[in-house]
Image: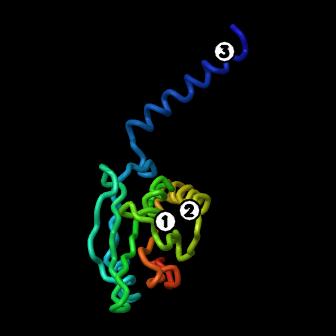
Amino acid sequence: MSKNTRIVIALILILAPFSIALKISKPTWIHEQHEVPITQEFKAFLASSGLTYFDAYKTINSDAYKVSLFQTTLAEDCFAMVYVIPMPINAEAEFIIARPLAVAAADFFFVFNGAVSDRYPSLKQWAVLAANRLRDLMNLPKHNAIVYGIASSAPCVNPRGFAWDLSAQ
């Protein structure tokens, strides 16, 4: 038997019990796709910025990505909607927020831990998720790792200019 064959067999023997244990124990850091609801605090923040909660709808057959709609109350001559979608795992819903309701958004961006970005903050979210895995092993409280995708339907409302300090969310 060659050296490479022995290494492969050793790896299989070492990793097989770990794989079985992982499937049985189902650690909390393994994410399943599930809906992340918009909290009352988040709704109150948007209400203080002139937006009222209007409705929510599923974007795909799963409960994982539900878009919440907020209507502007800033001006009578401005009928605009702001779409919010929480993305707790990764950027796979990025295309949804770029074209909510199959209409191109006037502006769309992402908010992560108070920072506004034109691009999905994958690396920052990954770092927080990795730190949360370690914090979970040590039974420490986790940090918020949710990225919010935000889109507006008309240029008369500018949610990008809000003070997006959502650390309490």
Q: Residues within 10 Å of mark 2 (few under 14, many from 20)?
A: many
Residue 38's image quarter? bottom left
**Sequence-wise, which precedes: disc 1 or disc 2?**
2
Answer above or below: position of 45 versus 124: below
Place of residue 52 in the rendered image (x, y in percent of width and height, measured from the top left): 31, 82
Residue at 28%, 67% (x, y): give it: 56
Question: Residue under circle 3?
Answer: 5
Question: Residue under circle 2?
Answer: 120
**Sequence-wise, which precedes: disc 2 or disc 3?**
3
Q: Secondary structure at mark 2?
A: loop
Question: Residue under circle 1?
Answer: 147
Name the quarter where the C terminus is drawn. bottom left
Count of labels in the image = 3
Answer above or below: position of 30 versus 157: above
Residue at 72%, 10% (x, y): give it: 2
Residue 126's image quarter? bottom right
| Type of amino acid under label 2 | Tyr
Q: Which mark is residue 158?
A: none
Q: Residues within 10 Å of mark 1 (few under 14, many from 20)?
A: many
| Type of amino acid under label 1 | Val
In the image shown, does 104 or 12 lie closer to the viewer? 104
**Sequence-wise, which precedes: disc 3 or disc 1?**
3
Please report contact status of discs 1 and 2: CB closer than 8 Å, yes or no. yes
